[in-house]
Amino acid sequence: MTRAQQKEKTRRAIIDAAFQQLSADKGYSSLSLREVAREAGIAPTSFYRHFTDMDELGLTLVDEAGLMLRQLLRQARHRIESNGSVIRTSIETFMEFVTGHSNVFRLLLRERSGTSAAFRSAVAREIYHFGAELADYLRKETDCPAERAQMQAEAMVILVFHAGADALDATAEQRKQITQRTIMQLRWMAHGAASYGRKTQLSQN
């Protein structure tokens, strides 16, 4: 293994260790450098070879979480091609992400309204990118104007994030109910957006 490969492996271990330390009772602001270093299997002084401080590591975690969200959207698209049900497949895929990567989702939820302006800005940026990808998908699939697709995507992201927050500490049966409720809400939203689009077209003709 080359030195560059070893450095990247250690950096990855630090990121994974930080995510693993997060929980329902422990947010990022409660993490210590020593805890993360110990979990990653490195000396605390070695941490500084990869990150300037804990704030830089935290911003990196937010970037990672945003990337995972966008990968989730692409994964849902592939599933949709096989299953056909856009909304159900998308929500079920999202709920799998929430339950399988709860620490990642908790990070986004907490830092979205946290005390650090840099963290809030970073989370807002990642959510915006996620919404932009969703808007682009809606625009292509429904052939609606870009502005309307963006507004619908923003509303959908808000609804889905609330559902994800509710599902975090829910039982399996409760998550099932939350999933079904969210599917129905999104279907109503999509129906309303489509109806609005038709009315707008008629008024312009």
Image (tube, rainbow, N blue to C red):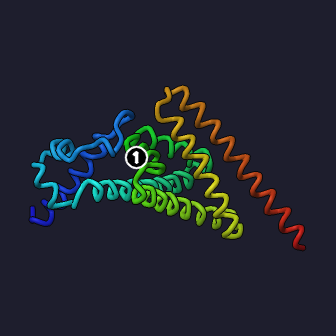
Q: Percent x, y for residue 123?
A: 45, 56
Say which amino acid is labelled 1: Leu
Q: With respect to residue 5, does 83 lie above or below?
A: above
Quadrant including the C terminus: bottom right
In the image, residue 143 lies at what x, y percent?
A: 70, 67
Q: What element carries label 1?
A: helix
Q: In which quarter of the image is residue 26?
A: top left
Q: Determine the residue positioned at 32% across, 54% down.
A: 58
- Return the residue at label 1: 107
- Where residue 142 sits: x, y (%)? 69, 63
Q: Is residue 122 above or below residue 41?
A: below
Q: How crowded is mark 1: few (under 14 residues within 10 Å), some or many (20 or more)?
A: many
Counting from the top left corner in percent of width and height, residue 158 is at: 59, 50
Up the image or down, 167 lies above or below 125; here it is above
Q: Residue at x 54, y 42 (%)?
A: 92
Using residue 124 as the reference point, say whether residue 58 is left or right of it.
left
| Side of 121 relative to 9 (left or right) | right
Residue drawn at x 51%, y 35% as measured from the top left: 167
Q: Give the camera-side residue of 157 and 45.
A: 45
Could you say which is closer to the camera, residue 167 or residue 143? 167
Q: In which quarter of the image is the N terminus?
A: bottom left
